[in-house]
Amino acid sequence: MYLFDAADNSGSYTPKASIGTPGYATNGPPGSVADADHYNAMMMAIANTITDAGIALKTTGEANDDGQLLDAIGGAHAVKAHATDADGTTHKTRALVACQTSQATGNRSAVVASLNGLASGAQSSVVACWGHDDKTVSTPGGQAAAVACYAAGGATDAVTVDGAGNAALACYNSGGFVSQFTALTSGSMIAACQGTQVTGSAANAAIVASRALNNGATVTNQGTASLIAASRGDLNKNAIIAGGAIATVMLAVADADHDIGAATKACAMIACRGAEVTGSALASAVIASGHGTTTADRPSVDGNYSVVLGCTGQVSVTADNAVLIGSNFGDTGFTHSDDNCIAMYEGTAQRIRLDADGNAFLFNLPVFANEGAAGSLATGQLYQTGTGELRIKL
């Protein structure tokens, strides 16, 4: 493209003021033939498009180049400034950029660099997602986003982000799982997950770096202001924070069922292999504990400000301000029900007990007649004599 450079051309461009009714040339009487002003307007419209794209105009002394306008708008080939809605109308507030078989049907929605993306919610977006085998990555929720997600494989595989202000980030679905939100959730996130769900009426809930395996296992966060992180729902097992739970956390749980109940608040489950927080527990936790002979024999807490720590099997704390440490009762069962009490076990044998009155108890100490007979003990180890005296091995 080049500008006129004839000897009698004008050195400046002044758009002509309209003196008639806009219309079309008819090749008829004078006045219907395009004049110099009209040609100048068309020329400048093309020239401005080219220079705005950062391309310098040619001169008549240079090789003819009739592809500059195409170069200037070439990037638009990958962009659709509007998408067709179900009613057949078009909306300039919807965009598809570098996509294939995708739709942006929500008001002010966009799908970018994606395959089989569907941005159907208002102000929603699907970015860098791949819906393989005709599976869909969709954002029916308003202000919802799906970023770097992959959906493929079984008939139910999909990534669906519903509810207001929710996001799915780097989620991968294959093998019959669905990463999704329900319409009632808001302000929630799934990140670096497979087959996980935020459901019910949860708000500000998140699942991070978690995975559901083996057809039917789920990692589900229904609690409000709650988090599930580094969880693996293997062997058809579940990791679930129930609807109604508030400010609860599951961290590093795997291989068995994990549940935090609906009436709990400010509770945690950390580094567990099968555990539960039940009832209306407040500010309580199960830490570094796991199931016994069967996955159903799992430790639990149902008290306020209480902890199960380093325990295995079917044990529970039902008291307030209570701590149970190091027990292993398998499937035989044990309940720690004393308020304001710390109980330490070795397997099924109780070792130390600190009660609500400030008393300390020691249990199952080795028995020796005297210091000489206690030679097998380590220096500083406690033992008792046959008469019940407490001694320290020197």
Image: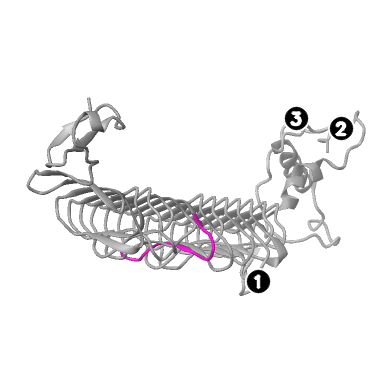
Q: Which of the pair 316/281 is nearer the observer? A: 316
Q: Which residues are magenta?
A: 232-244
On the image, the x and y values in percent for residue 56 come to: 77, 31
Viewer-closest of 282 and 14: 282
For mark 3, give the secondary structure: loop
Please tell me whether mark 2 sits on a helix, a strand or a loop.
loop
Count of numbered badges drawn on the protein? 3
Amino acid type, residue under disc 2 in the picture: Ala
Q: What residue does disc 3 label?
A: 11
User: Is the N terminus in the top left, top right, bottom left or bottom right quadrant?
Assistant: top right
**Residue 302 visible:** no
Gap between marks 1 and 2, in whole Å?
68 Å
Q: Residue at x 14, y 50 (%)?
A: 340
Of mark 1 and mark 3, the one earlier in the sequence is 3
* Residue wearing tag 2: 6
Q: Would you say residue 358 is visible in this rendering?
A: yes
| Badge nearest the viewer, 1 or 3 | 1
Q: Is residue 239 magenta?
A: yes
- The residue beneath circle 1 is 155
Three-letter amino acid code of the residue under disc 1: Ala
